[in-house]
Amino acid sequence: MTVTITRLYDDHVSAERAVRDLEAAGIPHKDISIMSNNADSWYKGGRADTTAPGTPRGRIDRDHDGVDDRAEGAGTGAGIGATIGGAAGLLAGLGLLAIPGLGPVVAAGWLASTALGALAGGTTGGVIGALSQAGVKDEDAQLYAEGLRRGGSLVSARIPDGDRSRVESILSRSAVNLTERAAAYRKTGWRRFDPEAPPLSADQIRKERELYRRSSAA
């Protein structure tokens, strides 16, 4: 039986690290997906802006071809659902898309493809539809979508049930505590993800991230 393990991260750097750890553990690229909020334009249609706070510093060139791996094959919208072989890994297939309620998102892998298909089919929220199809319960899917809306990143892996404990351990290393985050959201009056709500601005995203950084340090 195949199961889907998903975790929310407060920034793309942590999500990238989780993807690399999954790849190093032997999880196939085709079974991993990453989606990150891009409201602050840290990713500019084929390259990461390494001057933006909280983004990766310096070039990533694991295949030593002189090109940033995150830019190879990306382009605007390209690479969505792509499987990149060799040392480049899944992250070389990052591309841009727009999802109602979220705004600009940088993504690669199967979840992004499923989300686009859900949108085309009229499924509420896109991301929620994709997660629901993968067996994620609605309450968690609502929280994951809201976390993405507020500047976070999602990493999902489709794996055999026998690998559940191993993959959960990898993905949980720097992930958000979903129970605590749900309580924080609900204190602000939040109940469910609203795909009709306007996306947050870059300034609002920065404030959200700073809020949770302070909470983690407390």
Image: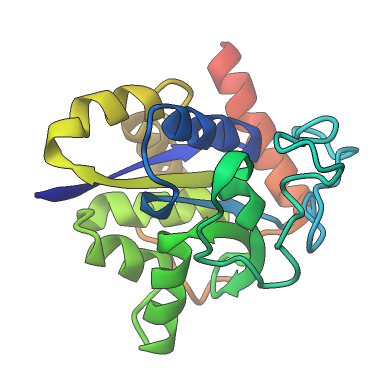
Q: Residue at x 34, y 45 (%)?
A: 157
Q: Position of residue 88 (x, y in %)?
A: 63, 43
Left or right: 95, with 196 as reference point: right
Q: Residue at x 53, y 63 (%)?
A: 82
Q: Position of residue 7 (x, y in %)?
A: 39, 39
Left or right: 167, with 175 as reference point: left
Q: Position of residue 160 (x, y in %)?
A: 17, 42
Image-quadrant location for residue 95: bottom right
Q: Position of residue 184 (x, y in %)?
A: 44, 36
Question: As rendered, which of 200 and 91 lies closer to the eye?
Answer: 91
Q: Residue at x 24, y 60 (%)?
A: 134
The answer to whether residue 176 is above or below residue 156 is: above
List the single residue furthest toward the top. 218
Position of the C terminus, as image quadrant, is top right
Can residue 152 be seen here? no
The answer to whether residue 22 is above or below residue 36 is: above
